[in-house]
Amino acid sequence: MSNPEDLLSESLGSLYNYTPITHSSAGSTFTYDYLGREDEHDGGDDPTENYALDTPFTITLTTPDTQPANWALHASSIWVSALYIADHVHDLHLDLHTKRTAGEGTRLRVLELGAGAGLPSILIARLYPTADIVTSDYPDDELISTLADNVQKNEAFTHCHAIPYAWGSDPSPLFAPFADVSSRRTGFDVVIAADTLWNPELHSKFLGSLSETLKKTPDARVHLVAGFHTGRYTVESFLKAVPDAGLEVEEAAEREVGGNRRRPWNVDRADEETEEERRRWVLWMVLKWKESALA
């Protein structure tokens, strides 16, 4: 990261223990260095499997801008939750999903909603060349153009597709890259999203999109990572609405940004923590279908 805004953020963090919630600015260049997999393999007896996971490389992104009417999207930054997913991409356990879909004779399908610059999607596409990735965001011409350019210049275009999509609308465009006519019915094996819960007015539409796109199988998963910059009660309202979409929370853990601490989700911390403390944590939640929804 070389632009002045990023240098300032780093300085604030070092000098004042200040944790930024966004990085970069509209139109600037952001680089992300993938350092290779440091944790254990997700399974299998062959240590050479998925060798791409162990090879360092760099992703270069242009931070998108939007048309003035869509500034409220706050899409002109790299949000800390997107970085957290990238830094912990192996916690998505895509190796296990890939093995399962390969056993079924299909390719793993991953969807990112509210992708912005597309960091998690592009990283996944680089790490898993046998998976099909759809990276999506609001149908703003400038935003989608930048997202598509990021996919192209990071050589992920063969199996990563930038698609405009508004939550709550017909999800058919998200399945358009697949020639398989059953795609619309089967859905995506994994859906991810970073910092998409900050506006409670959009929770219903967002949950509707999750239920319309997630594959209806016991193994399908949604991974959401959210900061607390609009408060814990906003996140709590989303969690309470999850069952209405036929989904349930499998896991909800708070994780320290830039650290290793983890703790259970607790909305009551809202009454005691400072803004500085709130910025140091994100919530990683995993959703799956309720058994009754699969019946």
Image: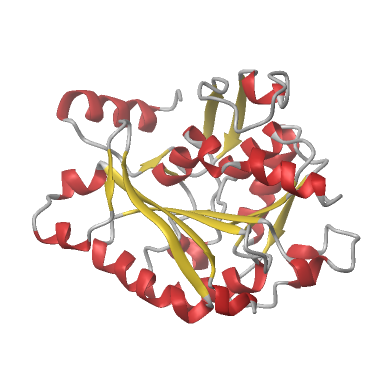
Residue 36: quadrant of the picture: top right
**Residue 197 image point, x, y percent:** 41, 63
Q: Residue at x 48, y 44 (%)?
A: 82
Task: Judge by depth and name the residue closer to the eye, 176 or 218.
Answer: 218
For this rendering, which residue is in front, 232 or 268? 268
**Residue at 41 percent of width and 55 percent of height:** 251
17 sits left or right of 116 in the view: left
Please tell me how many numbered marks the rendered image carries: 0
Q: Quadrant of residue 280?
A: top left
Residue 61, above or below 188: above
The image shows residue 186 at horizontal and vertical percentages of: 76, 67
Picture quarter with the C terminus: bottom right
Image vertical order of residue 267 relative to residue 172, above or below: above
Please identify the residue farthest to the left as the structure is shown: 272
What is the x, y in percent for residue 103? 81, 46
Residue 237 vs 124, above or below: the answer is: below
When asked about the image quadrant of residue 59, the answer is top right
Residue at image x 26%, y 37%? 19
The foreground one among 286 and 157 is: 286
Is residue 173 in view from this perspective? yes
Taking 198 as reference, is 62 above or below it? Answer: above
Describe residue 259's horizontal placement relative to residue 191 as left or right: left
The residue positioned 76% from the left and 72% from the top of the image is 172
Residue 231: percent from left, percent from top: 24, 61
Q: Is residue 28 visible?
A: no
